[in-house]
Image (cartoon, rainbow, N blue to C red):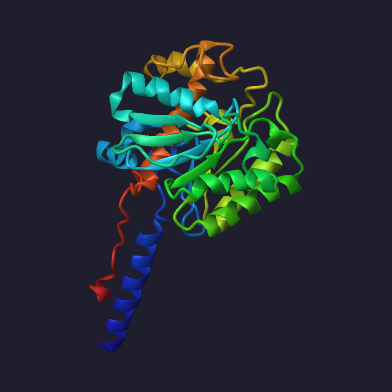
Amino acid sequence: MKIKTLLRLALAAVLLALISAQVAPLPAARAQTQPAVQLAAPGYIVVDHTTTDLDLIPPEWIAAAQELAVHYAHTSHGSQITSGLAALEEDHPLYAYEVDYAGSTPPTTAPATPPLWIFDGNPPETYIEPGDYWEGEAGINRTRAVINTGLFDYSMWSWCGQAGYYETSQIQTYLDVMADLEADYPNTRFILMTGHTVGGGSTLLETNNNLIRQFAQTHGMILFDFNDIERYTPTGDGPYNNNDDGDCEWCANWCDAHPSDCEHLPVGDCAHSDTSEDAELFCSLKANAFWWLMARLAGWPGPGPLTYVYLPTILR
């Protein structure tokens, strides 16, 4: 009897650990629409090509996400997210958000009520290169000035082309600075991002992006995998090398097969991906991934299935 009791307790502890860590394997039929299960440090969340289906997010979690405040700094490629957000909101008011652009000084107050608030830029500018956010003391101090307001739950900076030509040591500096900022500001989390694709591919870019992915996993950070959303279709076909001249190798075929996904694209307003209307799908998918991320950060556990564990008869 004592052995049976001990076995029950041990199994219960294992079950609790599995549920808490959410490490249940995904059924093959749903694997393409789920965030990949990762054995990673606590706090790790990633959005990528598998997390762009907004129909999987319950509306109450979109509402919860609208309570958040996000500091977002970027150059032209990063504007793909905000362009996609604007087009999405225009057609679907459920995904309402408010954006304020950086002026000469950091904001002093937040909007009184939802929707989701995005503060775009890093005072005194809105076009934010590495040296304006994380590379060098002056840029870091500008970022600190925004976070010191106490208004923001999250801060994110987007690469332009630098991830394709920066040395790996520079990428490591970016990662270390972001981790240090997160440690210094326990009430604000800092979101990592990969660099966009380049035509023909790039070994250095792939090495740098993989370094970012691995760092996010092992350090329990949040990752917006910008690159992965471009390289793979939402169902996982790929990898493709896109975007050298604003082209998308797979978007036209996707839009032909899934016309509803391409009915409301940000026409003429998707930086570096507007040489054809189909390529503007990039902006829409990145906006969808952004809302998915906000819902996860608001507490949504994702659409993964429940874990069922069958107890041996002796333990029942």
Q: Quadrant of residue 157?
A: top right
| Residue 63 visible, this angle | yes
Residue found farthest to the bottom: 2
State the residue at coordinates (37%, 69%): 14
Nearer-the-camera pick, 122 or 191? 122
Image quarter where the N terminus lies is bottom left
In the rendered image, the vertical position of residue 186 relative to residue 157, given as above or below: below
On the image, the x and y values in percent for residue 279 come to 54, 17
Number of numbered discs visible in the structure rendering: 0
Q: Quadrant of residue 129?
A: top right
Residue found farthest to the left: 316
On the image, the x and y values in percent for residue 315 come to 26, 75
Image quarter where the C terminus lies is bottom left
Question: Is residue 233 found left or right of 264 in the rendered image?
Answer: right
| Residue 234 visible, this angle | no
State the residue at coordinates (29%, 42%): 64
Nearer-the-camera pick, 26 or 211? 211
Question: Is residue 315 found left or right of 120 in the rendered image?
Answer: left
On the image, the x and y values in percent for residue 313 come to 25, 71
Question: Is residue 30 found left or right of 83 in the rendered image?
Answer: left
On the image, the x and y values in percent for residue 124 come to 58, 34
Question: Is residue 74 found left or right of 305 in the rendered image?
Answer: right
